Amino acid sequence: MERYLSYLKDYNPIFIGVICNLPVLDEREKNRGDRPIGFARSQLEEGIHNNRPYNFTIDNTNLSANENAKTICEKVFK
């Protein structure tokens, strides 16, 4: 994260944490089939979202991609 922040030091980035509950995360991973099963779970258990400089977080457990995009736009462009 420190490296990314250094690359972006001349900009004003907006960091958005995108989360969902574990059963949905597991199901999505299985359905996508493009990564090892359990990878997302391991990242979550290792604390991938810990100590991140998120401006805000959205929970996409029950939202569509369009609903997530709308939520992000409402927060960013308010």
Image (tube, rainbow, N blue to C red):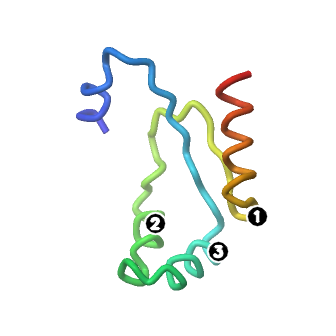
Above or below: residue 70 compared with residue 60 = above
Q: Quadrant of the C terminus?
A: top right
User: Which secondary structure lies at badge 3?
Assistant: helix
Q: Are marks 1 and 3 in contact (CB under 8 Å)?
A: no
Q: Which residue is mark 2?
A: 45
The front one of 45 and 70 is 70
Q: Earlier in the sequence, mark 2 or mark 1?
A: 2
Q: CA distance from mark 2 to mark 1?
A: 21 Å
Task: Identify which residue is drawn at 57% across, 30% down.
Answer: 55
Above or below: residue 24 compared with residue 68 = below
Marking on residue 24: 3
Dot 1: few (<14), some (14–19), or many (≥20) neighbours within 10 Å? few
Q: Nearer the viewer, mark 2 or mark 1?
A: 1
Q: What amino acid type is highlighted by mark number 3?
A: Val
Q: Name the residue furthest front.
A: 66
Q: Quadrant of residue 11?
A: top left
The front one of 74 and 27 is 74
Dot 3: few (<14), some (14–19), or many (≥20) neighbours within 10 Å? few
Q: What amino acid type is highlighted by mark number 1?
A: Asn
What x and y, as percent, mark residue 42? 41, 71
Q: What amino acid type is highlighted by mark number 2?
A: Glu
What x and y, as percent, mark residue 34? 39, 78
Task: Identify which residue is drawn at 31% across, 29% down.
Answer: 5
Q: Quadrant of residue 28?
A: bottom right
Give the number of marks.
3
